[in-house]
């Protein structure tokens, strides 16, 4: 596993929409993440990789989350990275069982982004790993992904929580076409009551506030009948 300056999380989840949303949250926080949808693949990678923590679902193909935890603790012993469960199983017996088996935390789906990242940060700090700020700059736009802050020509730009989520997700996917359905699912959190038109409203706000215009090196394109693509014009 390649070494990076940011802590790396092994994430076991076989539900695609949940996995995509959680991976985006982790990356936006300045962490690295490797996604696995099979328990055995996750266990093998952790045994040979340098992971700061593991985030495990319970019911996944071929090897369950509890089986992965048991295998890692058996094989790695004291070198086993801290394990957090993120699962829909919410009985008291399940929580007690996993904490007794060596998990350091247990979160029940659906979980909010702030709660998940707060719990991850607690685990990383306990392990002596501090989350490093990840800042990227494109011309006059600078983004602090860890602290969810935006700067245009050196001045802080205030965005709403939803605008922040949308902007960060676009900037994680520069050059990629994101369909409206995908954006509504990922950014708006599977809320079927949200109208597609609201994507256009938020996109217009981001163009204005973050200067996502050709004059600043950007093009936020509305692809008719599909969705949006954010393009950086100076590559």
Image: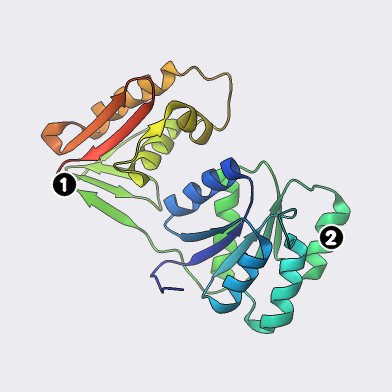
Tell me what residue is drawn at x 21 percent, y 33 percent: 219
Tell me what residue is drawn at x 26 percent, y 31 percent: 220
Badge 1: few (under 14), some or many (20 or more) residues near its Cα, within 10 Å? Answer: few
Extreme residue in the front direction: 62
Tell me what residue is drawn at x 43 percent, y 50 percent: 28
Left or right: 90 as drawn, with respect to 38: right
**Along the line of sight, the residue nearer the viewer: 176 or 189:** 176
Tell me what residue is drawn at x 23 percent, y 51 percent: 137
Estimate the x, y position of residue 89 in percent, counting from the top left. Answer: 79, 48
Left or right: 202 as drawn, with respect to 116: left
Element type at marker 1? loop
**Considering only vertical position in the picture, is 65 above or below 195?**
below
First in residue order: circle 2 vs circle 1: 2
CA distance for labels 2 and 1: 51 Å
**Considering only vertical position in the picture, is 208 above or below 123?**
above
Q: Is residue 163 visible?
A: no
Estimate the x, y position of residue 172 in percent, counting from the top left. Answer: 37, 46
**Considering only vertical position in the picture, is 4 above or below 95?**
below
Left or right: 225 as drawn, with respect to 71: left
Estimate the x, y position of residue 139 in percent, counting from the top left. Answer: 16, 46
Where residue 139 is drawn, which disc sits there? 1
Extreme residue in the left direction: 215
Where residue 177 is drawn, which disc sits there? none
Q: Mark 2 highlights which residue?
A: 96
Element type at marker 2? helix
């Amino acid at each position: 596993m390649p070494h990076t300056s940011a802590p790396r999380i092994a994430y076991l989840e076989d539900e695609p929409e949940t996995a995509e949303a959680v991976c985006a949250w982790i990356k936006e926080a300045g962490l690295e993440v490797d996604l696995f949808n099979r328990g055995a693949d996750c266990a093998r990678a952790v045994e040979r990789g340098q992971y700061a923590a593991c985030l495990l679902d319970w019911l996944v193909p071929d090897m369950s989350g509890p089986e992965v935890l048991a295998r890692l603790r058996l094989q790695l012993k004291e070198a086993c990275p801290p394990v957090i469960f993120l699962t829909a199983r919410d009985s008291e017996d399940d929580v007690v069982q996993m904490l007794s088996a060596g998990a350091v935390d247990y979160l029940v789906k659906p979980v909010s982004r702030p709660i998940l990242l707060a719990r991850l940060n607690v685990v990383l700090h306990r392990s002596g790993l501090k989350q490093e700020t990840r800042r990227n700059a494109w011309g006059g736009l600078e983004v602090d992904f860890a602290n969810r802050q935006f700067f245009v020509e050196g001045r802080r730009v205030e965005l709403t929580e939803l605008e922040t989520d949308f902007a960060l997700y676009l900037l994680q996917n520069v050059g990629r076409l994101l369909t409206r359905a995908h954006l509504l699912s990922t950014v708006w959190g599977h809320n079927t009551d949200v109208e597609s038109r609201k994507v256009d409203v938020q996109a217009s706000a981001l163009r204005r506030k973050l200067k996502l215009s050709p004059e600043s090196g950007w093009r936020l394109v509305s692809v008719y009948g599909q969705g949006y693509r954010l393009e950086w014009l100076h590559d």
